Image (cartoon, rainbow, N blue to C red):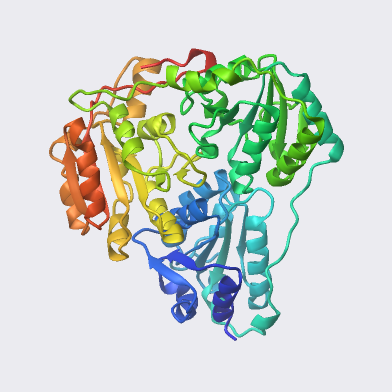
Amino acid sequence: MKAAEAIVKILEMEGIDAVYGIPGAGINGVYKYLGQSAVLRHFCHRHEEACVHAAGGHFRASGKMAVAMCTSGPGATNFVTGIYTCNIDSIPVVAVTGQAVVSQLGKDAFQCVDIAKICAPVAKKTYCVTDPKRVPEVFAEAFRIAREGKPGPVLVDLPLDVQNADIDFDPAKYAPLSFENPAPKAEDIVKAIDMVNKAKNPLLLMGGGVLLAGAEKECVALAETLNLPVITTYMAKGAIPVEHPLNAGHCGIQVGQPIGNKVFLDSDLVLGIGCRFTDRHTGAIDVYRGARKFIHINVEASEIGKIFPADLGIVADAKKAVDALLAEAKKNGKKSAHVDVADLPRLRKELARKVDYDVKPIHPHRVFAELNKFFDSETLFTTGCGITQIWSGQLQDIDKPRRYLPSGGAGCLGYDIPAAFGATVATGKRSVAVMGDFGFTFHVQELAVCAANKIPVVVVVVNNAYLGLIRQNQKYAYQYECDVAMPENQGMMDYVKVAEGFACYGERVFDPAQIPAALDRAVKSGKPAVIDIVCDPNSDCSMGAALDNVKEF
């Protein structure tokens, strides 16, 4: 059997049903058999980076892995940003790249680049397979590594002669490799519950790792059992229903919310599960740490103590840890008397940022108020970077896990549309890409992919005619403005025509009262759609350097 045929059969047996890619001469050995598969659906993109974002969106929405595939040289190097985006957000994807024949490696042959070495710093693992006999072993290992522990992307680079070589492979003897994520030590679980019980104002910090482990329901049950406020990190948005009595929102210096920051600053102990304590969450570390104690649970040992030492660090799978904590909490039978718990429903309303602006030009907050009202709780949302992403994180109401799918750690412009495409392919649910006018021009060509495949992604452009986040940084941190104004985006640039040129529905909105009707027309069009909402160019976004000095606008 050709190695290329074996690869396609392995993808099928690993449970893959979607490949997002672009064929090319360097990978055509595999595409021959990919096209013959009755299991694998292939979606041809218009840029290689978008293939990885789509495969990542597929997993973020469904929890099922997908594959990204492209040819050698510039095709492969275009994968780098997508791989980095998946890696920093712990998203498992297997990325397959074509390569020149083995004899040409390192000799500057046409479209020959050491993509395995290039991607090594931003991937969980990379391979360049030069021995055809190792193909089944490498792919089995690649899928195991992508899924095991802290998930992440794995790149497999395949020279063309390796793809086309004959190997001894029996599909009947192939099985995906099993793995076991670590369980917590019993004594650590007892100690953790004891620390929570002794604290005056403990809280539960739920990170994205809880969603990756499928433990969000158990985590909420743990909070209920212990009577703890729940703060979610940005990557865990939607893991607890908006109106749950223990929901204390987000904490952070950018996508944080006033309620989350208040409850956090009131706390004396943080039970952090599946989180990383990254900079946009913590802000100034001295303020974040204060005098409070931290219990940090993460499946990856290197995450514990990476930012600051934990008072108790537990290396464990989030699901196993939460189950053990829940069992111990029920046995112990004690509940927290946290000062804020009874007040959380009132605080959510009292501290909520204003969104009901009725002004022209449209205040950006109003856009998110309308999104919250128009779309149901099953809708999937993607967002990439900039001031629009921050407004989205602060203001969007998400009631269920795996419905809010941001580019978190990378903050990647151009992520939004292809990730929304992959999310809908994986789930059949409607996806809405929320982005700024500048970000819209990154990978806008992927609207063609949505249209060709009849995937009705709705793109909502919060058009403030600025590089808004950079303008705000220049203004408040440096007291100047340089090359961030883009008034043409509200004038000579016609995003409606762009949409129509890609066989999509398009509409521009100037009046806040017309936003719901425009969204309704977009959905009823049955096509991918672009709603360009012209907003106030001068609106700022609430943020700061530390949790105790976030400036509200």
358 shown above or below 7: above
Q: Residue at 54% across / 75% down in the picture? A: 8
Q: Using the rendered view, name the quadrant where residue 88 is placed.
A: top right
In the rendered view, does 380 fall on the left or right side of 485? right
Q: Residue at 77% across / 41% down in the picture? A: 324
Residue 548: image location, x then y, percent:
53, 13
503 shown above or below 539: below
In the rendered view, does 414 fall on the left or right side of 516? right
Does the image show residue 390?
yes
Of residue 38 and residue 89, the one placed in the foreground of this image is 38
Of residue 370 and residue 510, the one placed in the foreground of this image is 370
Q: Residue at 49% across / 18% down in the picture? A: 347
Q: Using the rendered view, name the quadrant where residue 268 is placed.
A: top right
Residue 299: image location, x then y, percent:
71, 44
Of residue 229 and residue 301, the one placed in the foreground of this image is 229
Of residue 172 and residue 231, the one placed in the foreground of this image is 231
Residue 272: image location, x then y, percent:
67, 31
Does the image show residue 306?
no
6 shown above or below 282: below
Q: Quadrant of the N terminus?
A: bottom right
Count of labels in the image:
0
